[in-house]
Image (spheres, grey):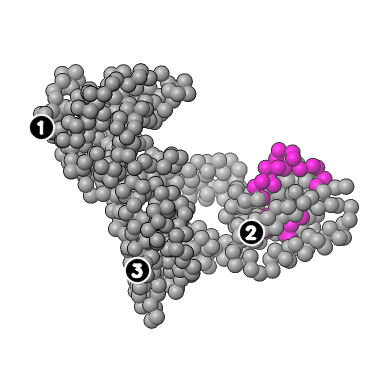
Amino acid sequence: MPTAISYIRFSSQQQSSGDSTKRQSKLIAQWLKNNPEYHLDEQLCFQDLGISGYSGANATKGAFSEFLSAVEKGYIQEGSVLLVESLDRVSRQDIDIAGEQLRKILRAGVEVVTLTDNSWYTKASLKDSLSMIKALLVMERAHEESEIKSKRLRSVWAEKRLKAEQTGKIMSKRCVAWLRVSEDRSHFELIPEHVRAVRRIFQLRLEGMAHARIAKQMNIEGFSTVNQYKSVKGGFSQTSVTELLSNRSVIGYKIPSKSMAVKGVQEIPNYYPAIITEQEFYAVQQLKQGGTGRKPSSDKPLLTNLFKGIIRCSECHHVMILSGASAKRHGNYRCSMVKAGRCHTKGLSRLKTDTALIQGLLYNTNRLNLQSPTDTVTGHLQTELTELTKRKENLLKLAELSGDIESSAVRLKELNKQIASVQGEIANHHQRESSTHLETIQHLDMTVKKDRVEAQIIIKRVIKSIMLNTAKATCDITLHNGIKLNNYPLSHVIDGARFSDIVSLLEDKEFTFSDNETSIPAPIHTAPEWVQEAIAHEANRKPPEPL
């Protein structure tokens, strides 16, 4: 007995409360009744509820993507029938993409039945021009309908956005959970208990607490969840904390609703009253950079790696990790690939490395004119983005004129990837610049967890990468402003003030330390009390086991 496979999809959450699912299910049941020779495979019932076919999300990460994968791998037997209400349930993308998806299914011997018009597409349909033209026309109409709807929604949003920016007019009574719209709809009012909760979450994160522990601490302190409709005391979870910490609405942005699912809709800045400063918000975002997200941060200061995600092995370019570190031991920097047998570099004393970098470099970064190239960097990236966008537009025009869609699609995909990369660089650059106004860490105490977390933020803002050569006890340092320091010594503290003044005067902004220059130590008074205590502690303990 041949198999029937059902697929149900609707695009918006609002449709979940309507009759879309019931209607599609009823059509499937009626077809099976009229075709008793087919049996419905209950294990192969695919549903994408509230997932867009216009964006192609159903074909990339929805249930339909699983169906396409099963077809491609031959898990679905030839002669099986896919039952759908209409072809627009399968896809609302442009006819090139939607048509190719249909052709792949039919080539595999899987048939498609559209229930509203009782059309039946088989492998033989691929050679039937009338049948394929009919399918393409249905797909084109579906795509055009979605395109019109998308433009209409963008237009409505654009009009509301313009009024909000020009007049400060509130778009709707729906807003973020820590605010409410006043009765006369003239302004937003703070909900004090929710505002306190959000600020406390950011405070705990900036003290170095992991997301899961923040949720636990918020529950211990008796805070209620930040929710407009049902606030639950002691109901914080790691997920709710993570979402709040990345929500740009806390600094005043109006974020388009996810349910709109419309491309090209921009955020509205300064729409809400900010309850977190931009410096605090971007400082929290900086803490994400270079993290794996697997291990929660520790309360022990020494277990906070100041150079996490920045310091790498000069041999294999993989991240250096802490080895042998504990609440009282600094341990060593070791390549993360050593344990896997993919790198054979030795470890290097973390105390000596950190001391050399902190005292020699990071106590003197204010001398390196870190702010000077900001406009240049942003301008360069914006120019590159404009050029890539123009090339994309030209490619689309060329493809339209020549009709050679397939060969252009590969290049278009590459251009989109490059555009996304540049946009990411611009966003990261803005994030770094906004994360802190400080340029040195000289005022911080590295024995305190909160200060070490603040140091992490400043270091990630200043330093792009450190390539560590453990054999020579040197490193190559690249700063975000383009300055490069080659062969930087780590065996002792150099006179950072002297070389910083030299580098700031160089045209090429590159400085290479020679053997003679690395032998000049800094005056002993530059070592703060915490460094002297750490050195004394390391000298008095037993030497660690060799790596």
Asked if residue 7 is among those painted magenta in the image, a careful observer would answer no
Q: Amino acid at mark 3?
A: Pro
Q: Secondary structure at mark 2?
A: strand
Instruction: Name the residue carrying label 3.
Output: 192
Q: Name above or below for residue 492 compared with residue 253.
A: above
Residue 323 placement, left or right of 34: left
Q: Position of residue 7 (x, y in %)?
A: 72, 55
Q: Residue at x 43, y 39 (%)?
A: 295
Residues at marks 3 and 2, CA–CA distance in whole angstroms: 37 Å
Residue 477 placement: quadrant: top left
- Please tell me which of labels 1 and 3 falls first in the chain: 3
Q: Is residue 270 visible?
A: no
Residues at marks 2 and 1, CA–CA distance in whole angstroms: 67 Å
Q: Name above or below for residue 100 compared with residue 496.
A: below
Q: Secondary structure at mark 1?
A: helix
Q: Are marks 3 and 2 in contact (CB under 8 Å)?
A: no
Q: Quadrant of the C terminus?
A: top left
Instruction: Name the residue carrying label 2.
Output: 49
Residue 518 placement: quadrant: top left
- Please tell me which of labels 3 and 2 falls first in the chain: 2
* Range of residues picked out in magenta: 64-90
Q: Which of 121 and 222 lies nearest the eye of the viewer? A: 222
Q: Position of residue 222 (x, y in %)?
A: 40, 61
Q: Name above or below for residue 445 compared with residue 532.
A: below
Q: What mark, if any, has residue 525 been given in the picture?
A: 1
Q: Position of residue 286 (x, y in %)?
A: 34, 46
Asked if residue 77 is among those painted magenta in the image, a careful observer would answer yes
Which tag is nearer the camera, tag 2 or tag 1? 1
Residue 538 placement, left or right of 228: left
Q: Which of 257 and 481 lies nearest the eye of the viewer? A: 257
Residue 529 placement, left or right of 273: left
